[in-house]
Amino acid sequence: MKLLNPLLLSIFSIISSASGAPTSVKRGNDQQGVVKVDFNVHRGSSVGTAQLGAQAKRNFKRNTDGTAAIVLENEQSFYMANMTIGSNHQMVGVLLDTGSSDLWVNGRDNIYCSKTSTTGDSTVSKLLETRDTTSIDCSLYGTFDTSMSTSYKSNGSDFAIYYADNTFAKGEWGHDDVTFGSVLVNDLSFAVADEATSEVGVLGIGLPGLETTKTQYENLPMKMRSAGLIHSSVYSIYLGSNAEKGTILFGGVDTSKYQGLLKTVPMVDVASNRIQVEMNDMTYNGMSFFNHQFYPALLDSGSTLSLFPQAVIDLIVSVIDLQYYEELASYIGSCSMIESSNFTFNFGGARIDVPMFNFFFEHMVVNDDGVSRTCVLNVGVSDNVTLGDSFLRGVYTVFDMEKYELSLATATFGDDTENIQPYVDSVPGAILMSKMTLVQICLMWLQGVYL
Ligand SMILES: *[C@@H]1O[C@H](CO)[C@@H](O)[C@H](O)[C@H]1NC(C)=O
Ligand SMILES: *[C@@H]1O[C@H](CO)[C@@H](O)[C@H](O)[C@H]1NC(C)=O
Ligand SMILES: *[C@@H]1O[C@H](CO)[C@@H](O)[C@H](O)[C@H]1NC(C)=O
Ligand SMILES: *[C@@H]1O[C@H](CO)[C@@H](O)[C@H](O)[C@H]1NC(C)=O
């Protein structure tokens, strides 16, 4: 997430729809050993203004001096889920974040929560209001009132987290019973912020090495595991067809949501605590954009766009024959070609097709012949590859936080049928790319399995 490095921004949020007392929490049709949590995808420039279903765009603006500027809109994505905390089931929203590892929520007494909504017209309050630039609207995602939960216990330790965008959260560590989806997690460690400059708390489910505490403790995936709710610290992320909703399955895989086999590759540079894999190529119709280079690719749900080195973008432009369009200061191409093609990503031999259109947006051009549709390349530039929401929404991704592996497959968007399988000691139905022998590869190729 916005922790330490803005590129790590990868957030999700939890607000709560759960009702009913913990004792009456229903397991529903949930598969044993799997915890399902739904989330909404909000996009925007900040959590406070992000909206459900917004689209990331590069907008062209002409400066007063005549120069052109590209303005990114809705460049961040936020995966927002719901949870309830405490004996009286207080609904709190948090951002689901694979780039940090602690859970914290806004306390009811967060001093930055808007003091403006109830103030009258007095000059003094107006003055305070204008000076208080960091005042936030805590009603957006809810706050947690520790005094109302009889099961809440503070443990007396201080909590503090600072983000690269200068926001921060400070408070105390404590523990209480928390409900996610239809599942109750007893006695979960989390922090309650009494000073935080973000409207919404964060549910960090990243690598344990990113916990802010001196010694490691059981964060949510680990706690679910030790409580026997799941078999391993593993979760799968899937976004629905319109990319406005998604599901995270702790401890399992929904094998009905992807095509072919899940392909497992190791995370690289785990010491950095970022979720990265080695990316060996990216192609269209067998033509490479990587030119024999390879790059570490950061998987970042908090970035709406995907980012590529300039050399890769130059090859995309020439290989798929995009034209520079001055009006938008961007590259454009034929929508009919783009909508019917894939980019193929190659991670150590695991090939994943992603619809090419995910990396474009549609734009209407007015010219002498009337109005025509064009598709505008919508990627960012960075020395390293970042695979953001535009990639993730085309892919079924399994994060194995114990074996430091990712399993990937092209996502499919069919009906609501589910086939949820628990992870017992390996990702159900996945093949480990590095362990595959040449013989196996040949056999699979003969059987027509496309890797
Ligand atoms: C969370 O709760 C809010 C408010 O009830 C609701 O609008 C939203 O759809 C819920 N989100 C999810 C992912 O269920
Ligand atoms: C309080 O909880 C945090 C997180 O679990 C832990 O790191 C810290 O050591 C705990 N403090 C005490 C005094 O037990
Ligand atoms: C794109 O990839 C998907 C998944 O592999 C495949 O089903 C589809 O046929 C591909 N489309 C094209 C045009 O190659
Ligand atoms: C690119 O990746 C390398 C290796 O992981 C890292 O050292 C470097 O800081 C990254 N650069 C940027 C701009 O993130």
Image (cartoon, grey):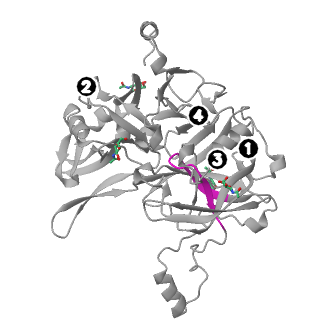
In the image, residue 118 above or below residue 34: below
Q: Which residue is mark 3?
A: 219
Q: How many marks?
A: 4
Viewer-proximal residue among 234 and 324: 234
Name which of mark 4 and mark 1 comes first in the sequence: 1
Q: Which residue is at the far bottom?
A: 123
Q: Which residue is mark 4?
A: 402
Query: Residue 215 in the image: x percent, y percent?
Result: 62, 50
Residue 431 is one of the magenta-drawn residues: no
Please state which amino acid type lies under the numbered disc 2. Answer: Met
SS label for mark 2: strand
Q: Are marks 2 and 1 in contact (CB under 8 Å)?
A: no
Secondary element at image label 3? loop
Q: Quadrant of the C terminus?
A: top left
- Looking at the rendering, which quadrant does residue 88 occupy? bottom right
Calculate the distance from the C-alpha at mark 2 to the C-alpha at mark 1. 47 Å
Vertical relation: 86 (above or below) 310: below
Q: Residues within 10 Å of mark 4 (few under 14, many from 20)?
A: few
Tell me the kind of residue under disc 1: Val
- Report the Cα–Cα distance between label 2 and label 3: 43 Å
Q: Position of residue 16 (x, y in %)?
A: 67, 54
Sequence order check: which comes first, mark 2 or mark 1? 1
State the CA–CA distance, disc 4 to disc 1: 22 Å
Report if residue 313 is visible in the image. yes
Residue interval drawn in magenta: 92-107
